[in-house]
Image: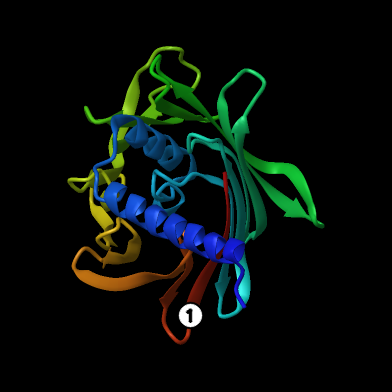
Amino acid sequence: MLTRSFIIQIVIAIFAFTFSSLSYALTSYRSLTAEENAIFSMNLVLTENSSHSIFPPDFRMKELKEVTQKNGEWMLTSLITYDISGNLTFLERREKKHRGESVTKIYKNKEGYWVKCIKWLINGKESDVGKVEVRYLSDPQGRIIRSELMHSEWIREYLYNDNAQLTEVIEKRKASYNSDEEQYVRKYSVKKYYYNSKGYLARHDLKTHNNTLVSTYYFDYNDHNMLQRVINEAIAYSTQKRRGEKNYIHYDQNHNWLHAVWGNQDNKFTQNRDIVYY
């Protein structure tokens, strides 16, 4: 026989679930604020991965673990941590490439600059041989506006619209590597971003040095702003188009995706996530 206290607990649980579901339904249709756009853009600059920045703004991730496999064999693992506001605080990614395995870390150094450091694994240990380091510079508003490939003449600039959304990444090459003057012999757009009316990323273009479109990504969401599908159209030899889809399935209680699949029978990719919330 059910006790009175047990019945009360059931009623409270049902009410809490209904209220939380209603609360999400009420908030999920609103547009992103300028502050949320800025957080998304910052994470997008640092990770260069839109899915690491897309999540319902009312639920904050603390830790994100991700594993990507090709035909059942791991290709990439990553660990990302965020603060309570949704800003990325640290990233560590291990990736298997044709040249071997690499480890990428994104963090703030002692001087307060964001740094991306890529090292190769030699005999299972991180090596400074062939190390790549990128330093990011911010404006007074805290937006990343420039990145410098250390010990190189190449830099990138990041442009934003009035809604604090990242819209374009421009690559530049200095005319004289040893010159202190800001003179460039090459300047071209490498990435462009477009957003829907609610502030979510809708399209992403990749370009080459001669401003030729190489690939376009389209992002599809459902009525709750949940990312469901990314369509990729790659252009080969300027005329031939190849189309691929990445589908997101298995969402958690906060409407973040936990599993993604793409590719074909010969090369099938899967991506799995574990998320810890504040």
What amino acid type should be assigned to the residue bearing mark 1?
A: Asn
The structure residue drawn at horizontal position 44% and vertical position 74%, both measured from the top left corner, is: 261
The structure residue drawn at horizontal position 60% and vertical position 65%, both measured from the top left corner, is: 6
Disc 1 secondary structure class:
loop
Residue 224 shown left or right of residue 76 in the figure = left
The structure residue drawn at horizontal position 76% and vertical position 47%, both measured from the top left corner, is: 126
Q: Quadrant of residue 129?
A: top right
In the image, 180 versus 16, the foreground residue is: 16
Q: Is residue 145 above or below residue 36?
A: above
Residue 271 in the image, given as x and y percentages of width and height: 52, 68
In the image, 177 versus 69, the foreground residue is: 69
Q: Quadrant of residue 222?
A: bottom left
Q: Which residue is mark 1?
A: 267
In the image, 263 versus 41, the foreground residue is: 41
Residue 264 in the image, given as x and y percentages of width and height: 41, 82
Quadrant position of the N terminus in the picture: bottom right
Residue 215 shown left or right of residue 87 in the figure = left
Quadrant position of the C terminus in the picture: top right
Q: Residue furthest bottom?
A: 265
Q: Is residue 105 visible?
A: yes
Residue 115 in the image, given as x and y percentages of width and height: 58, 31
Residue 101 in the image, given as x and y percentages of width and height: 67, 58
Q: Is residue 97 visible?
A: no
Q: Is residue 159 above or below residue 67?
A: above
In the image, 194 versus 8, the foreground residue is: 8
Residue 193 shown left or right of residue 5 in the figure = left
